[in-house]
Image: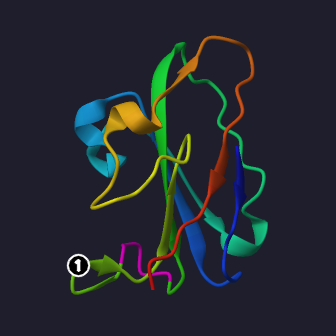
Amino acid sequence: MSIYGLRNMKGNVLICVTANPRFFPDCSKDPKSFSANVPARNSAPVSFRGLAQGTYAISLLHDENGNGKMDMAVFIPKEGFGFSRNPAIVTGPPKFKAAAFPIDAAEVSQRVKMKYML
């Protein structure tokens, strides 16, 4: 997976990969999820090995201040985010289906663009 559009190299990029729609976009409570916390300056490319065939979705958070969570201003994210397949964002995060992609080959690549609201 490659990440582009980071507005700066501060903090970390939190990456979460899940096959379970119930745990998307925050898959931290999914025991079968794959996650990574990489420094923003080293964020591309990122690889996950050992994913079984299936349908997955990826969510990203540019945790600029390193506190491990999405900071909000009223109901607007202050930090960047991104999703596999780069679905349009209207209000709130996309549904699993909008970000889902199949893994049915040895290597699958996603290119995720970070989005910033503020």
The image quadrant that residue 6 belongs to is: bottom right
On the image, the x and y values in percent for residue 23 come to 27, 41
Say which quadrant the N terminus sits in.
top right
On the image, the x and y values in percent for residue 73 come to 29, 88
Q: Is residue 25 left or right of residue 87?
A: left
Up-down relation of residue 95 to residue 112 (above or below):
above
Q: Is residue 92 visible?
A: yes
Q: Which residues are magenta?
A: 66-70
The image quadrant that residue 43 belongs to is: bottom right
Q: Is residue 84 magenta?
A: no
The image quadrant that residue 49 belongs to is: top right
Point 61% across, 11% down: residue: 104
Tell me the amino acid under the disc marked 1. Answer: Phe
Up-down relation of residue 40 to residue 72 (above or below):
above
On the image, the x and y values in percent for residue 9 come to 71, 81
**In the rendered image, which residue does mark 1 sit on?**
75
Say which quadrant the C terminus sits in.
bottom left
Point 46% across, 31% down: residue: 100
Classified by dominant secondary structure, the portion drawn in magenta counts as loop
Point 31% across, 41% down: residue: 95
Q: Residues within 10 Å of mark 1 (few under 14, many from 20)?
A: few
Q: Is residue 103 left or right of residue 8?
A: left
What number of labels is visible? 1
Point 69% across, 68% down: residue: 5
Q: Is residue 32 visible?
A: no
On the image, the x and y values in percent for residue 97 come to 36, 31
Tell me the SS state at disc 1: loop
Q: Is residue 67 magenta?
A: yes
* Viewer-side residue, 1 vs 89: 89
* Viewer-side residue, 93 vs 109: 93
Q: How is the image coloured?
A: rainbow
